[in-house]
């Protein structure tokens, strides 16, 4: 699976305005709505579902990265967006560090395999220090999307 298979380019946020975890999640889900991937009437329930997932344990996986995610019946296929925070957010991360890179994932409940493959694809790339460094240096939506395509091409999957 490639990042470009499910990351919605029009929903990528090069600089989050959010100052908190919930604001960041709300901003990212809103971006997927504006990109036409989530119907407005489902925006709040998706934000609530992601926040409920966060209560189980932070999706701030360490090294400045968070991957908030949920399953929701309003989406027909796996969708995701990427957001960057140059100042960092307190995400209650496992390592206690602020988060600068966020990937938010929403998938249909009847496609658990896609959900897991999406998470695996994201985390595989996030293990690369070079990928994280280049991503954090990206200042525009186009630069982020280009980087995602580049790593897809390198992965050859």
Image (tube, rainbow, N blue to C red):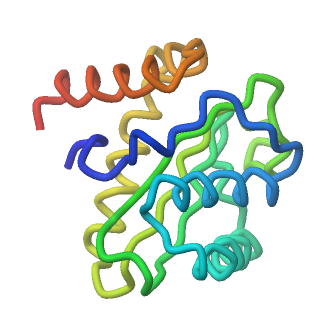
Residue 21, position as x, y percentages in the image: 80, 54
| Position above or below: 21 against 114 | above
The quarter of the displayed image where residue 9 is located: top left
Q: Quadrant of residue 45?
A: bottom right
Residue at the spot 37% in from the left edge and 79% down from the top edge: 108
User: Which residue appears at 87% of the width and 50% of the height?
Assistant: 20
Q: Work out which quarter of the rendered image holds the C terminus and state it.
A: top left
Residue 128 percent location from the top left of the image: 43, 24
- Up-down: is 116 above or below 100? below
Q: Is 79 on the left-hand or right-hand side of 81? A: left
Q: Give how far across and how far down residue 148 sits, in percent.
A: 35, 29
In this rendered view, identify the residue nearer to me: 52 or 15: 15
Q: Is residue 151 above or below residue 107?
A: above
User: In the visual, does 49 lie left or right of 74?
Assistant: right
Please give left or right for residue 57 compared with residue 42 in the image: right
Residue extending furthest left? 156
Judge from the rendering whether residue 145 lies leftward or rightward of residue 66; answer left or right: left
Residue 19 pos. (x, y %): 88, 43
Q: Is residue 97 visible?
A: no
What residue is at 20 percent from the left and 49 percent from the top? 1
């Amino acid at each position: 699976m490639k990042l470009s298979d499910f990351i919605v380019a029009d929903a990528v946020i090069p600089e989050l305005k959010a100052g908190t975890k919930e604001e960041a999640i709300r901003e990212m889900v809103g971006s997927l709505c504006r990109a036409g991937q989530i119907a407005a009437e489902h925006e709040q329930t998706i934000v609530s579902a992601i926040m409920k997932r966060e209560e189980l344990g932070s999706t701030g996986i360490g090294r400045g990265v968070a991957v908030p995610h949920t399953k929701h019946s309003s989406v027909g296929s796996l969708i995701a967006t990427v957001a960057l925070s140059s100042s960092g957010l307190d995400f209650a991360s496992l390592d206690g560090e602020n988060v600068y890179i966020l990937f938010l994932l929403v998938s249909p409940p009847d496609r658990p395999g896609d959900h897991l493959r999406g998470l695996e694809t994201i985390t595989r790339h996030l293990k690369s220090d070079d990928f994280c460094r280049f991503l954090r240096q990206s200042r525009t939506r186009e630069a982020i999307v280009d980087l995602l395509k580049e790593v897809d091409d390198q992965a050859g999957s």
